[in-house]
């Protein structure tokens, strides 16, 4: 669609409308299949139409400060999470899930229209960045592309696991209140948002691929060092450090795609990599949920009776191991991409 329509503003506006309708109509659902169609399908299609025109055009307008530019753009999702996490905790407790979803749908639509309206027609470098829609077979056979895809799959699978279970861990294991758990999630989101800008600025100076490799590897290290078998102090440190490190990959992936494969191939490769990341997200948190099992402290955990906190904490430790392995494996993949890209370009450069 981005390639076929010169005015991408129309795509983004349509996406803002569709995703808002998806969330709003979800509030009227009474069966699970209806939720799949509304909050699942409609919101998924609409948010992609809204999001990717912005993502596809931005890198083409920047070169020297591309990392900082993408960091600022992507920091918006962190700021949104920072605002919405405590706001929707209040809405859910006071007015219920139905009206909370309706307010979210109206919120998305009200903010989506002015944001979509500032998009311009494609021109110059931006037109070349959105030129292709398919990844060529020659591109798919490149070692950098294969490993980039595998790394994206593994990182997406592991990236959101701490975010999904941050609140439940703080409440179930560390005995924080639910409101404090929501606050901790907001803190993580705020740090992640600021880190995306900081990582982008740092990457422009020391190398975008270098920064991304280190951020992925150290995010896995943070899971093992700070989340596994953590107490309150270590868990608070984990919230901060993981927020910083996880922001690096998300902010720098688009910039490194343009750098490794060229701006002219950015649109097609970016679309495919994000498709792969979607597949990773489909199995990461759900498998972590199966490892953890359904639980409430002091009651029944899938597989037996739990009367003490240690067994529950053991299950969370298993989740941390699963998550840490995914992230470290992703780090190995992106590090190998860094090496292969240097080889393909004829020589090693410390700044890349």
Image: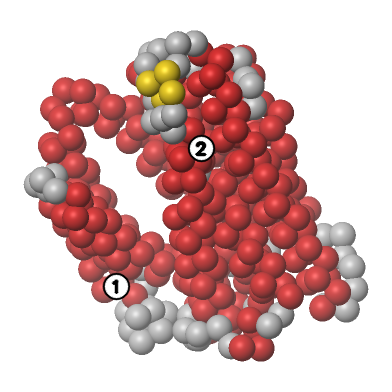
Left or right: where 172 falls relative to 315: left
Whether residue 215 is visible here, answered yes or no, is no
Where, quadrant-wise, is the N terminus in this rendering? bottom left
Work out whether residue 7 or residue 168 is closer to the camera in this orientation and state it: 168
How busy is the neighbourhood of tag 2: few (under 14 within 10 Å), some, or many (20 plus)? some
Where, quadrant-wise, is the C terminus in this rendering? bottom right
Work out whether residue 281 or residue 234 is closer to the camera in this orientation and state it: 281
Q: Determine the CA span between mark 2 and mark 1.
A: 40 Å
Q: Quadrant of residue 167?
A: top left
Which of the labelled discs sits on residue 291, or is there none?
Answer: 2
Q: Which element carries disc 2, helix, strand or loop?
A: helix
Judged by depth in the image, the label closer to the viewer, 2 or 1, is 2
Left or right: where 143 falls relative to 107: right
Whether residue 52 is visible here, answered yes or no, is yes
- Residue 343 is situated, as x and y percent measured from the top left of the image, at 86, 74
- Residue drawn at the location 33% of the way across and 68% of the way down: 49
- Residue 107 is situated, as x and y percent measured from the top left of the image, at 22, 45
Work out whether residue 265 or residue 134 is closer to the camera in this orientation and state it: 134
Q: Which element carries disc 1, helix, strand or loop?
A: helix
How busy is the neighbourhood of tag 1: few (under 14 within 10 Å), some, or many (20 plus)? many
In the image, residue 45 above or below residue 162: below
Disc with the residue nearer the chain's start (2 vs 1): 1
Q: Which residue is mark 1?
A: 11
Left or right: where 312 falls relative to 1: right
- Residue drawn at the location 13% of the way across and 52% of the way down: 25
- Residue 183 is situated, as x and y percent measured from the top left of the image, at 41, 23
């Amino acid at each position: 669609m981005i390639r076929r329509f010169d005015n991408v503003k129309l795509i983004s506006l349509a996406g803002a409308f569709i995703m808002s309708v998806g969330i709003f109509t979800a509030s009227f659902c009474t069966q699970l299949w209806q939720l799949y169609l509304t909050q699942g399908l409609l919101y998924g299609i609409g948010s992609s139409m809204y999001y990717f025109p912005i993502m596809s055009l931005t890198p083409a307008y920047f070169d020297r400060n591309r990392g900082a530019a993408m960091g600022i753009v992507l920091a918006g999702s962190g700021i949104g999470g920072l605002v919405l996490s405590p706001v929707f905790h209040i809405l859910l407790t006071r007015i219920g899930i139905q009206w909370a979803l309706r307010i979210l749908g109206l919120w998305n639509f009200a903010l989506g229209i002015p944001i979509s309206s500032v998009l311009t027609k494609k021109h110059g470098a931006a037109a070349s960045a959105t030129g292709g829609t398919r990844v060529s077979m020659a591109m798919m056979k490149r070692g950098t592309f294969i490993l980039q895809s595998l790394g994206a799959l593994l990182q997406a699978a592991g990236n959101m696991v701490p975010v999904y279970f941050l609140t439940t861990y703080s409440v179930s294991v560390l005995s924080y209140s639910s409101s404090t758990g929501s606050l901790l999630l907001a803190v993580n989101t705020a740090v992640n948002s600021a880190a995306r800008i900081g990582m982008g600025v740092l990457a422009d100076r020391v190398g975008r691929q270098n920064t991304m490799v280190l951020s992925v590897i150290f995010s896995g290290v943070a899971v093992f060092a700070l989340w596994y078998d953590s107490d309150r102090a270590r868990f608070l440190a984990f919230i901060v450090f993981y927020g910083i490190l996880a922001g690096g990959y998300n902010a720098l992936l688009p910039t490194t795609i343009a750098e490794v494969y060229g701006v002219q191939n950015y649109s097609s490769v970016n679309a495919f990599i994000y498709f792969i990341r979607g597949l990773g997200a489909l199995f990461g948190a759900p498998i972590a949920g199966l490892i953890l099992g359904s639980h409430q402290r002091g009651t029944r955990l899938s597989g037996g009776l739990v009367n003490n906190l240690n067994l529950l904490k053991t299950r969370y430790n298993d989740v941390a191991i699963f998550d840490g392995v995914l992230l470290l494996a992703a780090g190995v993949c992106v590090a190998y991409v860094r090496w292969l890209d240097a080889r393909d370009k004829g020589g090693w450069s410390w700044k890349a």
